[in-house]
Image (cartoon, helix red, strand yellow):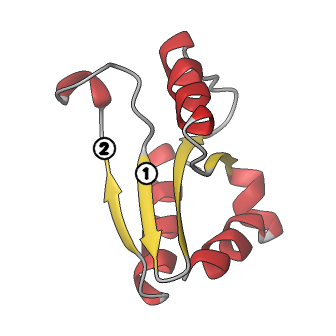
Amino acid sequence: MKHDQLVGQITDEATGLGIWWHYCTDSRHCSGHPGFPDLVLIGARGALVAEVKVGDDRRSLRQVRWADRIRLASLRYQLWREGDWNSGWIQKQLREIA
């Protein structure tokens, strides 16, 4: 599975659950500190910020620093992989915030 396919499945599920989301296609082209996570998802019962990885992809140091900063701010952060979709873990987390 490719990165954009997994993000598409996640955002389709989120939309179906009434969750608002923002997808940053490439944080290197956005304003602000580099390494910003892929997805911000906000539902009626909560919010989370997620980095999406497929295959052997690993987070960059900048992405790890963002994750640390997000957690320090007491926000919910997730690192999601395609196995998390296949197991239903991502869908469960989306339902929790919907």
For image coordinates 62% across by 37% down, the residue present is: 71
Near-viewer residue (76 or 28): 76
Residue carrying label 2: 24
Q: Is residue 41 shown above or below 65?
A: below
What separation in Å lies between label 1 and label 2 (alpha carbons)? 6 Å
Q: Residues within 10 Å of mark 1 (few under 14, many from 20)?
A: many
Q: Earlier in the sequence, mark 1 or mark 2?
A: 2
Which mark identifies residue 39? Answer: 1
Rendering coords of residue 47 (x, y %): 51, 64
Residue displayed at 43% across by 69% down: 42
**Tag 2's secondary structure?**
loop
- Marks 1,2: beta carbons within 8 A: yes
Q: Amino acid at mark 2?
A: Cys
* Secondary structure at numbered mark 1: strand
Residue type highlighted by circle 1:
Leu
Judge from the rendering whether residue 94 lies leftward or rightward of residue 23; answer left or right: right
